[in-house]
Image (tube, rainbow, N blue to C red):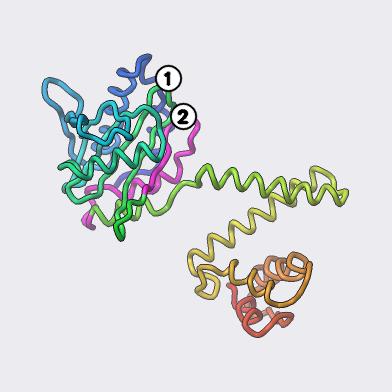
């Protein structure tokens, strides 16, 4: 069975441009070998070799969408018609990747319309591992960012779902592996903005900087935990619990009591006391019932 630990060790220790070569060509040659090693040795895919000693089968790009700004493309591994493609482009952007994916879809490389495409650009220290998903005529771009400075824990765990030696259909498992995404840069940026807003609000109230930071971290961590368990359906089988809970407050007519009354009740009673010992009755029947039955 494929080990997430081994995959993470490979990604952490070997997927670095500075140890793969000094030139763009060297880095790409060694990166292709790395991804072939990952998919063939760790995930039990089949190796694709090119003619005349080439690493992988060369994919013609002369008819590709010009917006992709693709430089080279290789077919490097496959299993059950699910293919692994490696593409170099001028710069790693979502628009360029979408254009390349559109070009691949038009050609024979995307046999069933879905595959994994690994993108790299000159002078980049990262790679994008992209699995497009087509639904209702739309192309959904799902990706992991790999390479220097990246935390590979989640992607390593999810790649184990793609072990081709398993009996379950590979396509289904690939889709599952790409459902759970690493937290995006956009999320981190917004997280930092919210963190600073809450911290600054506390500082205005003459709270010490260290205490303000500690409180803000704890508050946001609790919200993230709620988000996690609501996505599992563990709060009244409501995957939008926090949104609905907030709307209940907004519609209650109460002012300036959201944290002091509603959030504190959620964190320190509803989620901290066993169900058998809870008797929350400060809200309407619907809210009381939900809070009293949170595990």
Q: Is residue 214 above or below residue 135?
A: above
Residue at the limit of the structure toward the left, as seen here: 51
Q: Is residue 262 above or below residue 116?
A: below
**Element type where label 1 sits in the image:** helix
What is the quadrant of residue 135 in the picture? bottom left
Residue marked by disc 1: 18
Which is more toward the observer, 284 or 162? 284
- Indicate the position of residue 290 as horizontal and vertical percent values: 60, 78
- Indicate the position of residue 139 as horizontal and vertical percent values: 33, 51
Q: Residues within 10 Å of mark 1 (few under 14, many from 20)?
A: few
| Residue drawn 66% across the image and 72% down it | 270
Marks 2 & 1, CB-CB < 8 Å contact = yes
Residue 130 seen from this side: yes
Which is more toward the observer, 265 or 103? 103
| Residue drawn 44% across the image and 27% down it | 125
The disc label shown at residue 128, or none? none
Separation of residues labelled 2 and 1 (CA atoms): 9 Å
Residue marked by disc 2: 148
Which of the image's four quarters has the C terminus? bottom right
- Of mark 2 and mark 1, the one earlier in the sequence is 1
- Indicate the position of residue 90 as horizontal and vertical percent values: 36, 27
- Indicate the position of residue 226 as horizontal and vertical percent values: 59, 62
Residue at the limit of the structure toward the top, as seen here: 22
**Element type where label 2 sits in the image:** loop
Q: Is residue 201 left or right of residue 13?
A: right
Q: Is residue 254 above or below residue 92?
A: below
Q: Is residue 98 left or right of residue 233?
A: left
Q: Is residue 150 left or right of residue 295?
A: left
Q: Which residues are magenta?
A: 141-169
């Amino acid at each position: 069975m494929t080990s997430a630990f081994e995959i993470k060790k490979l990604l952490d220790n070997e997927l670095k441009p500075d140890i793969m070569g000094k030139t763009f060509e060297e880095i790409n040659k060694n990166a292709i070998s790395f991804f072939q090693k990952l998919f063939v040795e760790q995930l039990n895919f089949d190796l694709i070799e090119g003619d005349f000693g080439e690493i992988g089968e060369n994919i013609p790009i002369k008819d590709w969408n010009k917006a992709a700004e693709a430089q080279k493309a290789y077919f490097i591994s496959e299993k059950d018609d699910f293919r692994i493609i490696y593409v170099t482009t001028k710069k790693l952007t979502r628009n360029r990747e979408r254009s390349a994916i559109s070009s691949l879809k038009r050609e024979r490389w995307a046999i069933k319309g879905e595959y994994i495409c690994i993108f790299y650009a000159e002078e980049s220290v990262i790679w994008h591992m992209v699995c497009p998903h087509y639904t209702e005529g739309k192309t959904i771009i799902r990706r992991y960012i790999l390479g220097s400075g990246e935390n590979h824990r989640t992607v390593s765990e999810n790649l184990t779902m793609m072990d081709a030696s398993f009996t379950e259909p590979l396509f289904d498992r690939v889709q599952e592996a790409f459902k759970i995404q690493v937290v995006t840069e956009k999320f981190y940026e917004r997280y930092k903005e919210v963190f600073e807003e809450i911290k600054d609000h506390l500082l205005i109230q003459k709270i010490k900087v260290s205490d303000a930071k500690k409180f803000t971290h704890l508050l946001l961590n609790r919200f993230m935990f709620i988000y996690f368990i609501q996505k599992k359906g563990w709060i009244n089988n409501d995957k939008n619990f926090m949104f609905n809970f907030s709307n209940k407050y907004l519609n209650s007519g109460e002012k300036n009591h959201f944290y002091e009354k509603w959030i504190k009740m959620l964190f320190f009673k509803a989620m901290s006391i066993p169900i058998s010992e809870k008797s929350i009755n400060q809200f309407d029947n619907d809210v009381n019932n939900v809070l009293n039955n949170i595990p």
